[in-house]
Image (cartoon, rainbow, N blue to C red):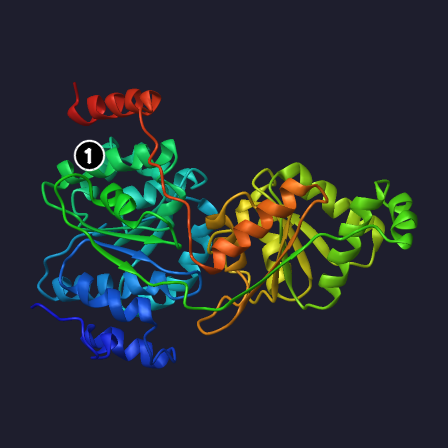
Amino acid sequence: MQVKESNVDPFSLLHKKIRERLREFGLVEATEPQRKTIPHILNGKNVLLISPTGSGKTEAALLPVFSLYLNEKEKKAVKPISILYITPLRALNRDIFRRVINLAESLGIRVEIRHGDTTPSVRRRQSLHPPDMLITTPETLQAILPGARLREWLKNVRWVIVDEIHELVTEKRGVQLAIALERLKELTKRELQRIGLSATIGSPEVVGRFLVGNGRHVEIVRVPIVKEFELKVLCPSPQAEDVKISKKIFSTPETAARIRVLVELLKMSQSVLTFVNTREIAEILASRLHLYDPSLSVDVHHGSLGRDIRIEVERLFKDGKLKCIICTSSMELGIDIGTVDLVVQYMSPRQVTRLVQRVGRSGHRVGRVSRGVIIALDDMDDILESAVIAFKTVREELEPIIIHEKAFDVLCHQIAGIILDKGI
């Protein structure tokens, strides 16, 4: 049955069980990405959904896929691992799992996670009793494709959802995933329905082709940055008090001025994410903040920290016990940390796309204003670059996406994988 995109409530097009659960969960009105995307997916089309953070992208993909799955299940036409959900970071798996598990289980759809940290006992259980939907990473998909038992279950995949696809297309991991999806398609002996979810990007057509491969059509659903951005660029000049502060934090008056302004911003807000460009700066900035005011509830979050430490920082922030996280790109993605009042970018973010994703973490709800402040260095290059990036952000002038090419090491890995696939 073909459904048309119209003013009809897209939730009304979904399977009866899903409509009932949505009412129970209090979800009665679809967001714009959901309204535009659900009919296309129900029609079996490949879809790339490009939408701002906090607009309901995950549900826009999962609800119609669950609906299609339930329809086929009633015909006894589906088998284990019919749905594959691929995310670029294992950290995302926790949040996706928490968000969808209640809905999935209430519908009789079993969901499990598989990645590098999955224990041997869980791996064995998944091989013997696979779930209906598997959440995994590009690297783990590469690893399980040649597996004797899981390979048999992967033959059943019909729907593939790639989350945060913009994180993959410019890297070797994206090349790896693109080839892995073609190997999966060959394994299933059918065309897979592919759904990509992306934050706002500058080259939708390029990412769409990356998602589906050559010779296939993709519907690109692009929801503009309709939410308001309130951006400021500050470049604090040293005051008399900053000389004293500089001695206290063992730095220069110029740095002390930036620290002072940052603390003022923290005190005016309930919850703040402060983004920096490197892990080293994150540690140094947090240290200086603690020297400036030991009572500040500030902690650090970046990829070099252990998983348990990152989870604890996220939990404390979400529970309101931590006012500020000093973070790198580890916090750009959709990790569930609750409400963020303000995003501070310490020094130029270097890219418009990066600032959009980072500032989009504040006001992370439909209809709310995203507030951001860039604290620029006192040299002219950083000030001008920050100002231009802020200007381009509000005008949605994003950098083009450049696909990574000629990843010969990935090619070698894939050839080895294909040899294992064929049993040569």
Identity of the residue drawn at 23% across and 32% down: 148
Horizontal side of 164 relative to 322 (left or right) equals left
**Mark 1: few/some/many CA within 10 Å (<14, 14-19, 20+):** some
Report x, y in % for residue 89.
44, 44
Report x, y in % for residue 166.
38, 46
Viewer-closest of 128 and 213: 213
| Secondary structure of the residue carrying numbered label 1 | helix
Viewer-closest of 259 and 140: 259
Q: Quadrant of the N terminus?
A: bottom left
Identity of the residue drawn at 41% across and 44% down: 167
Is 31 above or below relative to 192?
Answer: below
Report x, y in % for residue 210.
26, 41
Q: Quadrant of residue 366?
A: bottom left
Tally of marks: 1
Q: Quadrant of residue 378?
A: top right
Report x, y in % for residue 411.
28, 23
Is 323 above or below relative to 90?
Answer: below
Q: Is residue 87 visible?
A: no
Q: Quadrant of residue 269?
A: bottom right
Identity of the residue drawn at 61% across and 48% down: 327
Q: Quadrant of the C terminus?
A: top left
Is 320 above or below relative to 142?
Answer: below
Identity of the residue drawn at 63% across and 40% down: 381
What residue type is disc 1 on? Arg
Q: Is residue 204 visible?
A: yes
- Residue located beneath label 1 in the image: 183
